[in-house]
Image (cartoon, rainbow, N blue to C red):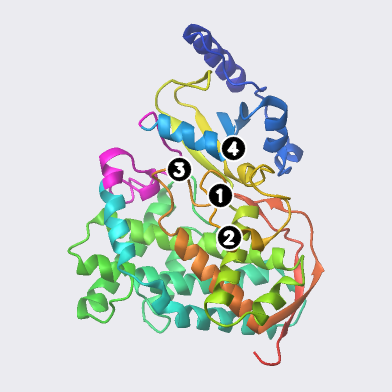
Amino acid sequence: MHLRRVTLQHGFRAAFKGKPLPPGRLRILSNTALADQMLLIKESERLGPIFKVWWGGKFTTCIVGHEIGRKFLNENEGKTRAATTDLSDLFPFGFLRAMEGDTHRKYRRIFIDIFKGLNLADHDAFMRSVVRKTLVGLSRMEGPLSAATITHAFKKATTEIQLRLILGVKRDSPFYEPLENAYNEYAPNGIFLVAKDKHRAAYKRLRTIVGQVIEKEHGEGKDSESLLAIALAKGDPDETVIGNLIQMTEASRYDLHGLWFWIMNMLSRDPSILPRVRAAAAGPERRALARSMAQESLRMEQSEFIHRATTSDIVFNGFFFPKDTRVRICVWEGHRDANKFVQPSTFDPTRFLGEKQSMDAYAPFGMDKHRCLGGDWTIETSAVFIEELAATLDWEVVADGPPVRGVFHFEPSSAFSARLKLLEDA
């Protein structure tokens, strides 16, 4: 009944406006349809680059194509808002990506300044040691190793890296284990969609521990190489800044460990790629190659969409976008555009060597004012991961399967398993 009511309501509003709704039939999609990664590409081929679907229980207008997606965002700034989890009852104004207007501009400038204060290259050896320790530990386990075992180890590694880089908490700190446990209570399976009482309680525990970190470790000047320390050095950060740093730690440790598993999965498909990293000269040549593999992995998977909610009626490209509906800029589908990428379904890192891709073709971190500030961090930390993977391990895939829809995006098959072997000179 809800779907039918929404269909009729927006149909009448479109008729009143004298502009049609985007093409497409609103219907509840079956699990089989939702499991098809190509679903929205097929719809765009049938209906055009702008069409409507019933997605997540909401009227959703899909836009396929980065150029037209950017055009929509630029032309309708102020008429949409980020459709993401509202954290404003955890800390003032909520997460940066959900802010709008002057509030967003103020805090985005603050965080750009904070990020500029940390040189990630200074932490290369630290990140490398965490990754190598993790990979060696996996190689010593009885195989074959399941997807769950591998991803658990990767999440432990990304947690250690992000706690250090963002909050300045080292592995030997008395606050490390309490923080890790608190994060696992706060978001055991990634960022939640709706903040509930349990999330509020877990956030309070996190905020208390971070307050102790500020007092006991940063307050004595022990750390000057984390985002939190930089924020403290620039003045007295308010609750919005501290809350965002806490949330960035969770978002980044979750997203990064998922990307690393995708990287391992994709490198498994072509055994010729990792030897190229091993053979490349250490330094800029090897890093450029590893970086290109991270960029291609992001093009292929995990970067899926930008969600906006309309706050006003919009007419765009001749179609009526009703107020209080969703707009999905289809990033994954745009990354599979054969007009932008030759053989777009083929994993080919060389397409990122010596060539900078335009945002009209490649936008894994967003394409408007909400573009992720940690995008470069994601590429560089993943390049370190790839270099260490090449230097440390060889592996044989025992089982695999097609990608599956996870909580937030498609993930490698849970059937994936591999037998890992430590290289002799590792």
Q: Residue 362 carries which label?
A: 1
Query: Is-magenta flag for residue 95?
Result: yes
Q: Which mark is residue 295?
A: 2
Nearer to us: label 3 or label 4: 4
First in sequence: mark 4 vs mark 2: 4
Nearer to us: label 2 or label 3: 2
First in sequence: mark 1 vs mark 4: 4
Residue 138 in sight from this viewpoint:
no
In the image, what residue type sits under mark 3? Thr
> Which image quarter holds the C terminus?
bottom right
Query: Residues under labels 3 and 4: Cα distance?
Result: 22 Å
In the image, what residue type sits under mark 2? Gln
**Considering the numbered disc 2 on the image, is that residue within a helix, a strand or a loop?**
helix
Query: Residues under labels 1 and 4: Cα distance?
Result: 10 Å
**Considering the numbered disc 4 on the image, is that residue within a helix, a strand or a loop?**
loop
Q: Give the labeled residue for mark 3.
A: 84
> Which image quarter holds the N terminus?
top right
Query: Residues under labels 4 and 2: Cα distance?
Result: 19 Å
Residue 180 in sight from this viewpoint:
yes
**Secondary structure of the magenta portion, mostly?**
loop
Residue drawn 43% across and 43% down? 368
Query: Is-magenta flag for residue 167?
Result: no
Label 1: how many Cα within 10 Å (few below 14, some 14–19, many 20+): many
Nearer to us: label 1 or label 3: 1
First in sequence: mark 1 vs mark 3: 3
Image position of 314 with respect to 209: above or below: above
Q: Where is residue 227 in the image (x, y as percent from the top left)?
A: 32, 67
Image position of 239 with respect to 59: above or below: below
* Residues at discs 2 and 1 in contact (Cβ within 8 Å): yes
**Considering the numbered disc 1 on the image, is that residue within a helix, a strand or a loop?**
loop
Point out the stretch of residues depicted in magenta: 78-105
